[in-house]
Image: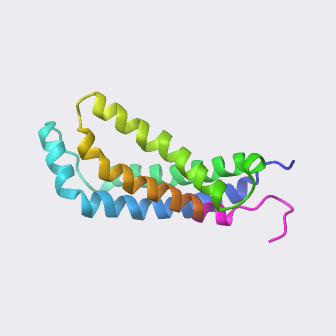
């Protein structure tokens, strides 16, 4: 068994992160923009868009993509290389990165289950697609293309 090809994890992760960042911009910057602003206002919060705030979210997207491809690389020996394994990794990263956070937000009364349904479905598709794209670029060291 070979070790993880970290160069390919980062390459695939950066590309997956680009997919995540584009998707998150579409979701939060366009589709849910008004609802998000209203929710923050109801909580008595204002979150300025742009600048350092945007940089944090962009970094988050890239780290999410890297983590997804790293998970894919880690489970490849058990499940085999390919899109099925990438989809499993995408589902797992979504479960940890979005679904569990939504449970916390709902439990704290910050959002209702109904308001979280569409973003959870969106981010599930986002996570699987981003992981598929990143995993497509992942190759073990010494493997032929």
Residue in view at x 53 percent, y 49 percent: 91
Across and down, in percent, residue 52 comes to 34, 50
Q: Residue furthest bottom?
A: 145
**Residue 68 at x, y = what percent?**
58, 51
Residue 34 shown left or right of residue 129 in the figure: left
Asked if residue 64 is positioned above or below residue 99 in the image, the reply reads: below
Foreground pick, 52 / 30: 30
Residue nearest the observer in this picture, 117 or 57: 117
Q: How many marks?
A: 0
Whether residue 72 sits left or right of residue 43 in the image: it is: right
Query: How was the colour assigned to the protein in this rendering?
Result: rainbow
Specify the principal SS of the magenta part. loop
Say whether residue 138 is magenta: yes
Specify the segment rendered in magenta. 133-145
Identified at 71% across, 46% down, the residue is 74
- Most foreground residue, 9 or 136: 136
Q: Find the residue positioned furthest to the top.
A: 108
Residue at the spot 29% in from the left edge and 33% down from the top edge? 106
- Provide residue 121's location: percent of width, then percent of height: 38, 53
Quadrant occupied by the C terminus:
bottom right
Q: Is 44 in the magenta?
A: no
Q: Is residue 53 left or right of residue 63?
A: left
Q: Residue at x 49, y 63 (%)?
A: 18
**Residue 81 falls in which quadrant of the image?**
bottom right
């Amino acid at each position: 068994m070979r070790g993880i090809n970290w160069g390919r994890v980062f390459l695939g992760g950066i590309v997956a992160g680009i997919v995540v960042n584009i998707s998150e911009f579409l979701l939060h910057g366009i589709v849910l923009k008004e609802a998000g602003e209203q929710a923050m206002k109801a909580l008595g919060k204002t979150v300025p868009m742009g600048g350092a705030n945007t940089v944090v979210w962009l970094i988050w997207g890239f780290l999410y993509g890297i983590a997804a491809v790293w998970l894919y690389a880690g489970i490849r020996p058990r499940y085999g290389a390919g899109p099925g394994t990438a989809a499993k990794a995408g589902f797992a990263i979504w479960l940890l990165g979005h679904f569990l956070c939504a449970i916390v937000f709902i439990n704290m009364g910050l959002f209702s289950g109904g308001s979280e349904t569409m973003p959870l479905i969106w981010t599930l598709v986002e996570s699987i697609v981003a992981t598929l794209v990143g995993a497509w670029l992942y190759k073990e060291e010494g493997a032929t293309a």
